[in-house]
Amino acid sequence: MIIKKFQANTETEAIMLAKEELGKDAIVMNIKTISPKGFYRLFRKPIVEVTAAIDDNINYRYDKTMPSKKQTYPDIIYDEPKASAEPEPEPSKESSAIEEKLNNLQSLLEKQIVEKADKPDKEEKKASNKNLACIQLIYNQLILNEVDEKYANQIISEIEGTFKKDSSMDNILSSIYQKIVLKLGQPRTISINHNTPKYVFFIGPTGVGKTTTIAKIASKFKVEEKAKVALLTSDTYRIAAVEQLRTYANILGIPLKVVYNVNEMEQARNEFADYDVIFVDTAGRSHKNKNQRDDIEGLIKSIPENEREIYLVLSATTKYRDLISITEAYSEMTGYNLIFTKLDETNSVGNLFNIRMLTNAPLSYATFGQDVPDDIDRIDPQSIAKQLLRGH
């Protein structure tokens, strides 16, 4: 059996060379790609090497008069056929001398290029590896703090190409910190104008602390903003929730009204026409129940769009998968701002970032305890970014 190797720019060209020399009965035994090594890798493309074979009993003819399709590559030795149709003429002494001088000059130039480029190349690689290691550490920290891989990769991809070769870890960390802050955005909080009543709806699943959150915000507007505040609740399914809100209303000295349907909502509008802000506690029903969501949607849409604000209240301790389901369900009903409760019960704020990225809904308030009205504040993007980048 005769076995030979053929090299070309592409697999097809290499196979054609094999068929031309060994004949159509040649069998391809192996195909591999050869990449240039060392300094040459910057300037030359990989080539394909095909190993082909043919039975000794099958005659084949290699015609050296045919135009050769083989390419010339440095440091590659081609197998030439031992037999030849006619001998090649020997080069003259003059042409040999010229060729030798040209080869020597080429070698000298290549040596100078390598000597000049070798050190910077090593330093550049070292700096690149340093940057990469730093970015990897920060990426791991984001994942540790439960940032979704999709969003962590998005952050890294957006800043990765902006660093200089000698960027310090502080510079890289600062760039990622600023990127996170920008993505979190400025918090959007409740605004009133004292001319037209503002209806603020609080929606969300059961057990996230809507009623307590309403009491905290209502207290701040009553005491700090000197606003004229009223409370409404449509949570008629939980007597305890109504009584809890009534207790807060009595302490604050503000009215509370229970509404069961859209008609009663209209009556409440007339009753509170001269108030600054009316906080509406909706039933904490299952986000999976469409009929229940439709009831809440009806109440919300009974108020003109320019007179209402909606806040989706979520617990920071809820599993990310469940938060996705909740936010998608309420997105079908209305647009909203985001409030996160129970930040004091978790070491990770990754879900705040994830849900902000998923919904593109503005962040607003965060709660971190049961004390009314103290344990609530507007979400601070700088503080969240710092927590995402540091260890527990």
Image (spheres, helix red, strand yellow):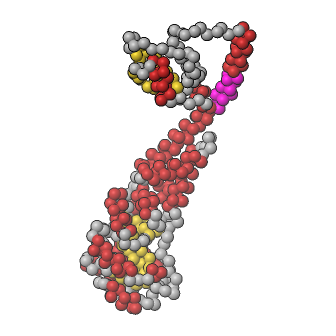
Q: Which residues are magenta?
A: 109-120
Q: Please report the residue visible at 31 percent of the width from the left and 73 percent of the height from the top.
A: 293
Say if 247 sits above or below 122 in the image. Answer: below
- Left or right of 57? Residue 289 is left
Looking at the picture, how far across and down is residue 186, in whole percent? 52, 66
One can see residue 56 in this view: yes
- Left or right of 390? Residue 114 is right
Q: Please report the residue visible at 60 percent of the width from the left and 27 percent of the height from the top.
A: 40
Looking at the picture, how far across and down is residue 306, in whole percent? 48, 81
Q: Please report the residue visible at 48 percent of the width from the left and 21 percent of the height from the top.
A: 20
Q: Nearer the viewer, residue 263 or 376?
A: 263
Dominant secondary structure (helix, strand or loop) of the stretch shown in magenta: helix
Looking at the picture, how far across and down is residue 208, in whole percent? 33, 67
Residue 97: quarter of image: top right
Q: Please report the residue visible at 49 percent of the width from the left and 43 percent of the height from the top.
A: 136
Q: Is residue 86 magenta?
A: no
**Quadrant location of the N terminus in the rendered image:** top left
Q: Nearer the viewer, residue 20 or 354?
A: 20
- Left or right of 363? Residue 282 is left
One can see residue 47 in this view: no
